[in-house]
Image (cartoon, rainbow, N blue to C red):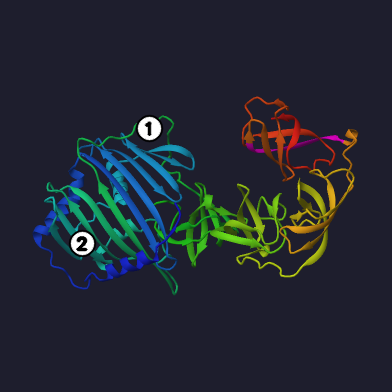
Amino acid sequence: MKFRKTAAVLLSVLLAVQAVPLSLQASFEQNVEASYNTAVQGQGALDGLDVTVTETTVSSSTNLSSEKKVDLKVTGMKGNSLQADIRVDTQEGTTESYYRNGYYYTNTSDGKQKQEMDRSTVWDLINSEVYMNMTSNYLKLLYSQTSADGGTIFHFAANSSTLGDYTQKFLQGSGEGQGVEVDFLQGTLETDPEGNIVSRNTEIVYTVTNGENAETFMVEMTADFHQNSQTVSLSSPDLAEYKESKPEKPNATITTLVRTVYTTEDVNVRASGSISAVILGGLNAGSGVTQTGYTSDGWIQIQYNGSTGYIWGDYISTVKPVLTKVTNGTMYATCGVNVRSGYSSDNTIIGSLSKGQGIDITGITDNNWIRVKYNGHTGYVYADYLSWSEPVADTYVQNGYLSGVVTDASFGSLTIQRDDGRGTASFNTTYASLNLKDTIYTGDWVEVYFTGVGTPYAASQVNDYTSHTDAGDAQSVTIEGVVVTCKPDQIEVMGSDGIYRTFDIEDSDLEMADDLCEGMVVTVSWMSKTNGAETKNIKALRVKA
C-alpha cells in the first residue's frame, strides 16, 4: 500500500490535538473512571473477540502516510482454551499467525514454524496489536456522554508524563539512539448499553529526534469491535506443515552489507525488521540510501537520519530506477521523430511522428522521455522533440527533395517513409510530373520533388524506377511478429523489426493449433519485390503460430 499526500489532514488533526487542555489535571469522576476501566478490562471477561484495527501514520516533514490493518479473532478467553487468528496487512506485506492448544504458529525466515507459548504471552501479543489495555492510569483527561442508543462515549487524553509504560507498547522496535517519544494522545471509546466496547478512535502524536533534527508523526487509529460470545468463529488452517522451533534460535539474523541502494516505490522506514515496529519516517521512490546489512527474513538495514532503520527488501534495487510521473495532455512533434517501445534509444522503433503532429501523452520519465498513446499502444518519444505548443504553420513556400519507401499510394496522394529517418512525408500528386517505370506500388523506392508548406506537400515530380512487369523479381519474405488486430480475412501484425503490416489471409495456408487471435505470435510469409518493405494489403502465403 503506497503513501498518500495528506498534509492538510495532518495539520488539521495536529491543531485539534493541541487544542486539548492537557496542561490541566482533570479530576476524574469516580463513576466515569470506574465505568471506563470496566469496559477496557472487561474485554478479558468475554469468551470471544472480533476486532478490526486500521491505522494511518502521517509524517509532518514529508506529508507522506502509510496504512496498517489488523484483523483479530479470539475464542476461549475464559479459562485455558484460548485460541486466536491474527492477520496484519501493511505496505511491506501480510502476516497470518495462529494460536492453538498452547502453540503459536507463524511464518519465519526458516519457513512455517510453531512455538510453545503460554496464555499470558499471547494475550500481551494481542494487546500489542489492538491496544485494548489502556486504563485510566494512562490518562490525564476523561469525561463521558450518553450516545443516541443509550450507550456511553468516553473522551480521553494523555501526554508523555501520564502514558508511562504504554509508550513502550506503542513504540515497538525502537531502541537507543533513535530518540522516539510519544508526545500526547487523545480519542474516544464507545460502549453499548451493556458496557461492551463497540469502537475506539485514537489519535497519537510521537516525535523521532536525531541530533538537532526532529520529525513528528500522527497516528489515526480506529478499532471496530464485532464480537460476542456466540458468533466469533476461527479459520481452519492446515497446521500440519508447521515445525516446532528451537526457543534459543533467533527469528532473524543480520548480515553486514554496505552499499548504495535505491527505493523502487515509496516505502516506510521502521525501527526494526518487523511490520509491527514503529515508523521512523519514509523514503520516496527513487531515493538513494546507504544499506548497512540485511536480515534473514527479508528486511534491509539502512542508515536513516543518523540512526538505524529498516525497509522491506522487495522495494530496493542496486540500479537507480526510471520513474514515470503521470501527466495527461497533447504535445506536438517539433520535427520528424521516432516513437519507440521503451524509454531508451536502444528500444525498438514502433512508428514515427511528423513535424507538427499532435499526440496524447500519459507520463514523463525522469530520464527525459515522454510516454505516449500511439496507434492503440504505449510508446515513448524523447522529450527534446516534443512541445506543449502547437507549431505555427510556415508562411512561406519552400522547395525540396525527399526520397523513401512508399507506404501508401492512391490517386492524387502519396506517403513515403523518409530515408533520413525523420518519419513519414505526405504529398499531393495531382499536378505532379510522373517519371515511372510502370506504376507506383507500396514498397517502391521513390524520389519526390515538391513545393509548399507541407502536410501534405505539393509534389512537382515523382520518380519511380521500380519495375513490376517481371514476376521473377519477386522473392519470398518471412517475418515474425505479434497479431495486433484480427479479422476473418485480414490481420495486422507488429513485426520484430517494429513495422506494422496488414495481411490478406483469405487464401493463406494457416498452420496453428488454436484459432488465430490478437496477441498470438505468428510467422508470416509472402512474395515481395521490395525485400519486405511493403506494409499494406499484403497477400500472405502462409501464417504459422
Please state the horizontal and vertical placement of residue 183, each as a whole percent of the image: 31, 67
At horizontal 37% and vertical 40% (from top left) the residue drawn is 97
Magenta-tinted stretch: 474-485
Please state the horizontal and vertical placement of residue 210, each as a whole percent of the image: 44, 69
Element carrying mark 2? strand
Report if residue 484 lies within the magenta region.
yes
Tally the numbered discs. Answer: 2
Residue type of the residue flagged with mark 1: Pro
Q: Looking at the image, which is closer to me, 216 or 364?
A: 364
Return the disc, 1 or 2, that comes first in the chain's sequence: 2
At horizontal 24% and vertical 65% (from top left) the residue drawn is 158
Q: Quadrant of residue 451?
A: bottom right
What is the CA distance from the residue labelled 1 to the residue labelled 2?
Answer: 39 Å
Q: Looking at the image, which is closer to me, 491 or 97?
A: 491
Q: Which residue is mark 1?
A: 237
Please state the horizontal and vertical placement of residue 248, each as a whole percent of the image: 43, 44
Left or right relative to 396: residue 37:
left
